[in-house]
Image (spheres, rainbow, N blue to C red):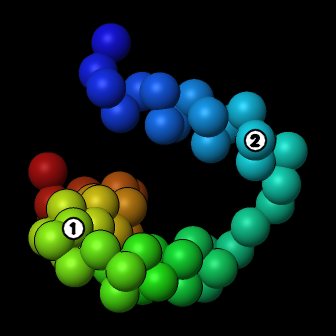
Amino acid sequence: MYFTDRGIEELARRRGEEDVTLEWLAERMREFVDLNPDFEIPIERLATWLARLDDPDDD
């Protein structure tokens, strides 16, 4: 188990029943980076990965 699994599990437990848009998620990610600029690169990588999940040219 990775350390991040605890945060992911908490997210699923607390917010798992909610419906959110990708625009809402993008805004929360922007807010997080504004408050935690050291995490800009990991958040950018996560956002890019999510954006390209279905892109067959990105394999």
Give the SS element for disc 2: helix
Within 10 Å of the Cα at label 1, are there few (<14), some (14-19), or many (20+) other Cα atoms? few
- Of the pair 50 and 42, the residue shown nearer to us: 42
From the viewer's perspective, is 43 left or right of 23? Answer: left
Q: Quadrant of residue 43?
A: bottom left
Residue identified by numbered label 1: 39
Query: Does residue 44 appear in this view?
Result: no
From the viewer's perspective, is 31 left or right of 3? Answer: right
From the viewer's perspective, is 12 left or right of 46? Answer: right
Tell me if residue 46 comes above or below residue 6 in the rendering.
Answer: below
Tell me residue 57's x, y (percent). Answer: 16, 63
Q: Quadrant of residue 44?
A: bottom left
Tell me if residue 18 comes above or below residue 31 in the rendering.
Answer: above
Residue identified by numbered label 2: 14
Please name the residue shown 51% across and 36% down the image: 8
Query: Does residue 56 appear in this view?
Result: yes
Give the SS element for disc 1: helix
